[in-house]
Image (cartoon, rainbow, N blue to C red):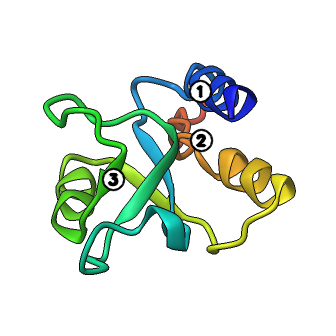
Amino acid sequence: MKRLLLLVVLSGAAFAADHPCVILAPPRRAMLPFGGHHSLVYVAGDFPSGIPFRTQMKDSIVDQVKAKGGQVIVLAPEYTREDFEAAKAQCVPPLKPTPTLPPEPK
């Protein structure tokens, strides 16, 4: 359990603060709240400014993250380390188009 917590804490530093990206996964059965409300569990990433950190997120919070320009990636319920690494690789800022300069006059 300590290793998982360490992984989550350290992986959060790998994401750029100017491009918020949150990786979520469905909760395991033992983690479901009473009544089985639909929620997602935080795995890694950074929240957009103005949205407080949460370990469990309902759809409305996911919508708020997206509305503030954040990227949300949802892993499969039984994800592997490779799935997690692939999700981290997707958490990169979109490439900004490089301005093209007009040709120099002759």
Which numbered disc, 1 or 3, marks the residue that appears first in the sequence? Answer: 3
Residue at screen point 68% across, 26% down: 2
Q: Is residue 103 left or right of residue 20?
A: right
Instruction: Give above or below for 23 relative to 37.
Output: above
Label 1 amino acid? Glu
Q: Residue at x 55, y 36 (%)?
A: 98
Packing grade of label 2 (10 A; few <14, some 14-19, many >=20) is some
Q: Secondary structure at mark 3?
A: strand
Query: What residue sits 73% from the left and 66% below the top?
Result: 79
Q: Please give the label number shown on residue 92.
A: 2
Task: Describe residue 6's horizontal placement relative to residue 70 as left or right.
Answer: right
Q: CA distance from mark 3 to mark 2?
A: 23 Å
Q: Nearer the viewer, residue 63 or 101?
A: 63
Q: CA distance from mark 1 to mark 2?
A: 34 Å
Toward the viewer: 65 or 41?
41
Q: Which mark is residue 104?
A: 1
Residue displayed at 64% across by 74% down: 76
Q: Is residue 8 left or right of residue 56?
A: right
Disc 2 residue type? Val
Q: Which mark is residue 56?
A: 3
Q: Secondary structure at mark 1?
A: loop
The x, y position of residue 43, in whole percent, is: 54, 46
**Mark 2, secondary structure of its residue:** loop
